[in-house]
Amino acid sequence: MMKLNLFILSMTAAMGNARILGTTNGICSVDLGKAGDYTILSKAGISTVPDSVITGNIAVSPIAATAITGFSLTADPTNKHSFSTQVAGQGKVYAADYAVPTPALLTTAVSNMENAYEIAKACTPNFSKVDGEIGGTTFNTPGVYTYKEGITINDHVTFEGGPDDVFIIQTTNGFLQAAGKEMRLIPGPLGGSPPLASNIIWQIAEAVIVEKSAKVKGTLLAATSVTMKTGSSLNGRILAQTAVVLQKSTITGPA
């Protein structure tokens, strides 16, 4: 079970060129449950323009394996999962029409994914802003950040802090990251380890588009589709309630 606990104190923080007032929030927990067992989980299909490279398990449910395209799947003799050369290491491919117990496990994972999305959406924001352009921003205070407009990233974004810091970014609109732009993780002023990609949650209500060669960090909790264009990469998870489209992308699940 994957659970993120967020402890927030009353605070103010600079975000872009604006200062955003934070309020006391207590604890916000986003529990991925069994959805955390998958690097990519989709309700409507996963496609790739080969070759993509995925580290970790991928799955579709409640649909059949025919919704996984471009992967040249090879069935395991048990028919509980399959393999693809684009799913690296110990990663496996799962679908709702595979042998038991796979269908039931995926039903639980999808339910947990939907629940995690709703919990992230309901987290009380500590920082609120209308303009969703976050390019050039350094997030150096853990908390819940909400944007009334869609999130756009036209410059590099930095998350600064330690490995226990959690950042939840919410929007009721979409997400667009420009070509070649990166998300960077750096230690705080006292040094040590930087924030973990697994502690960054993106709650996105509309389509997610990551342009060519852009680099994303964190878990994409997407209510609709996620498109990763040529050469793009993600360190985290894609948990999408519609389709996931990969184009020669690299998706690395959290260690």
Image (spheres, grey):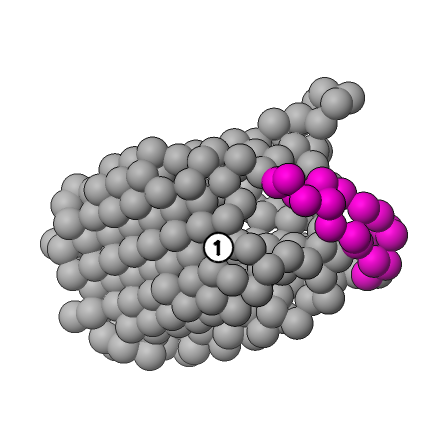
Residue 255 in sight here: no
Residue 222 in the figure: left or right of residue 26 = left
- Give the left or right position of residue 113, taking residue 56 as reference: right
Image location of residue 98, percent across then percent down? 27, 72
Secondary element at image label 1: strand
| Image-quadrant location for residue 174 | bottom left
Q: Is residue 134 magenta?
A: no
User: With 46 as the anchor, is 111 left or right in this view?
Assistant: right
Residue highlighted by disc 1: 151
Residue 66 x/y as whole percent: 16, 70
The front one of 104 and 221 is 221
Identify the residue shown where x is 61% and y is 27%.
186
Q: Is residue 187 above or below residue 37?
A: above
Quadrant (top left, top right, bottom left, bottom right) of the N terminus = bottom right
Look at the image and tell me whether residue 117 can be seen: yes
Against 102, residue 71 (above or below) is above
Residue lying farthest front? Answer: 17
Q: Residue at x 71, y 23 (%)?
A: 192
Q: Quadrant of residue 193?
A: top right
The number of numbered discs placed on residues in the rendered structure image is: 1
User: What amino acid is labelled 1 in the image?
Assistant: Ile
Tell me where the magenta segment starts and ends, as one range: 6-25
Residue 218: give x, y in percent of width and height. Answer: 51, 47
Look at 71% across and 27% down and name the residue there.
Answer: 188
How far from the left and from the top, in percent, is residue 151? 48, 55
Q: Residues within 10 Å of mark 1 (few under 14, many from 20)?
A: many
